[in-house]
Image: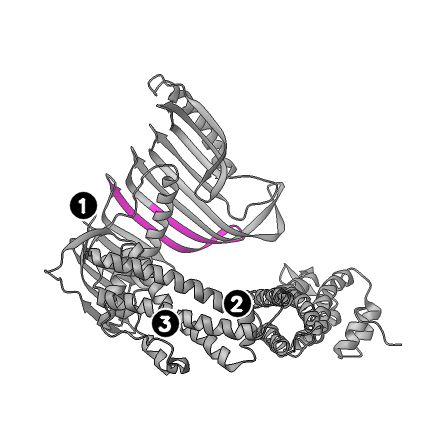
Amino acid sequence: MKAKLLNFTLSFLLLSLIGVSTCFGQEIKRYDGNLKIASYKGNAYYNYFLKNGDSIKTGPFLFNSKQGTELDTNPFMISGSFKEGLPDGKWEFKFGNYSLQAEKKFVDYQYVVQVNGVQRHITGSFKNGIPTGDWFIEIDSLKNSAKTTSLFKSKVSFKDGIPQQSFRIENTDSYMIGRLLRNGDAHDSWSLFTKDGIDELENWKFDKGTLQEITQYRDSVENKLSIPANIKVAEKSIYLDQHYIEVLKLSLMDKNSGLQLDAGLSKLLKTNARHYHHIEDIFKNLDLNILLTNISVNVPEYPIAEQEEQQFSKINTNYKQSKEIIDFLLSDTQVNLLKLRDSVIKNQYEYVGHLQEQYVNPIEKLMVYHNESITKHIQRPVLIKGLFNDEQSLASTMVMGDPELPHLKLEKYDLTEVTDLSDRLLETLRILQQKLDGQVLKTNKEDKYIHQEKGLIEQANLVKNAVDSVQKKDHSKNVRKALESVNEFIDQTLTAYSVMSESEQKIRRSEELITCYKNAIELTHTLSQLDQEHKKIKKLYQDQVWNPFTATIMDEDVKKKITKAYFKEISPYLISIVKKDMSCEDITMIDNTFKELDARLTLLREEDTERLERKIKRTKDPTSLLQLFGLIQQQP
């Protein structure tokens, strides 16, 4: 990066001098300071001149992340040049997403921090603001600051801003080759192959922008779908990105084709378009309309009539009100507590969740598709039936038998019916809200209870969110079981609290649980770091020794009795006592013991432990071992 910056600075100074005499006598000014482009904040270096009150960039341009005292784990660099305010010549975009290695390495007489992560590198050229020549995207995985795996790569050729000829996109498993006409239309066969190029996995056939056939091969079985042209429906040319893939998926929902359009060729196309959109957004924030995602494809067009626009408007209004009621009911503190002890309220609460999943979420998708101009490319019944295909399952829900609730069912799958459904859905939710509000009022709680319990539920949700977050990562079986026990502990203590009668004792208990749940978050974090902690301790208790037989330096374990006691007895014991029926005191004790144990093991590595190791040899009892480590007070 330093060499890049030095070369750029020299070019910048040279071109700055040239620029003074080439901008029609305009006074060239230089900017060197802070700049924000989209979500990126950093330092920018460029020349500009004023024209009709506007700043017109000219010459070399550099924008990169700030070099502070702390190393940036998300660095970026954008470099290129402008001509009369338009990008011109070669441009380069680099974005990193790294984690820093704990240890520094001594390289060329200086300590260097190595990184792991992913680097995105995009290069291409412009001519007077128009993409030209070959554009490359390269995404690589880095380990110890060295490229290890090519995650994604593409090459697209532009002429006068239009992509044409053949292009190639690849990832770790496969690659695709497609062909374009001179006007940018998708044409001929687009094929997806295995990485070695031996087996064809997928094939799309286009004719001047119109997709005619998709063939996929899975386990030597061919799945082919012909897409007949509808001569009665006008076609419209759009650009191939995620919107086209969505139109394609939604249009084929009634075909039961078995085609997988979330992977393979379509995934490569969407990924490539997403990276190009990213570059387009950067230039858009510089008030420049740059178009890179402009491969042309044809889609049918079913114009939105004025009546349909009015129906979409009505559906959207009902959706927003329904969503507001659902969000309130599902997050209401009193309802969340009452459902733990009242089966009727629990049933109503769960029914609200069903309404959200079966009706509100599909309506939300429908409005997203409409706002993104996707619905006009799909026959409305096909789209609606595909979105609401699971709604009939609600017929078995107990609350459906309530005569006060409007009947919710789709039969025609047209926009008029969805408008009516949204009316009845809102009415249903209002009735449920009245029922649940009435149950809450019966509890006749004072403000101090409500305020206290709101904080309790919020803290309980924070614990569950923390557990859910760390469970997504790889952990040992014992750690996963302990994390599940933390969740079960929250459920069990909340249920026990909900059946307590209203009293000062209940308020005190809620205060205790709030503190307890905060400690549970700390324990969750400690457990999530445990596997890494084990690796750290194992490495700490190793010495590098010379092996004369292999002429290499090897890692040799030291103080094995201490590490064996930690790995085999103490750590498994502490994990095992994380149970759903543990007490709040247990949570604090377990978390503190793990943290003190870490500090103690770090100190023991440098101490004379010969006497301690003799004592450790005599017992396998975890409590006795903790006493020997000085973490539990010896019994008199």
Numbered disc in front, either 1 or 2: 2
Q: Amino acid at mark 3?
A: Gln
Nearer to the camera, 148 or 285: 285
Residue at image location 10% in from the left, 60% down from the top: 231
Quick check: 342 left or right of 52? right
Q: Is residue 141 magenta?
A: yes
Q: Which residues are magenta?
A: 136-159
Q: Amino acid at mark 2?
A: Asp
Looking at the picture, how far across and down is residue 78, in whole percent?
Answer: 43, 39
Relative to 70, is 303 above or below? below
Question: Which residue lies under the disc numbered 3?
Answer: 358
Question: Which residue lies under the disc numbered 1?
Answer: 182
State whether residue 202 appears in this view: no
Q: Secondary structure at mark 2?
A: loop
Whichever of callouts 2 and 3 sits on the residue coming sooner in the sequence is 2
Question: Which residue lies under the disc numbered 2?
Answer: 332
Whichever of callouts 1 and 3 sits on the residue coming sooner in the sequence is 1
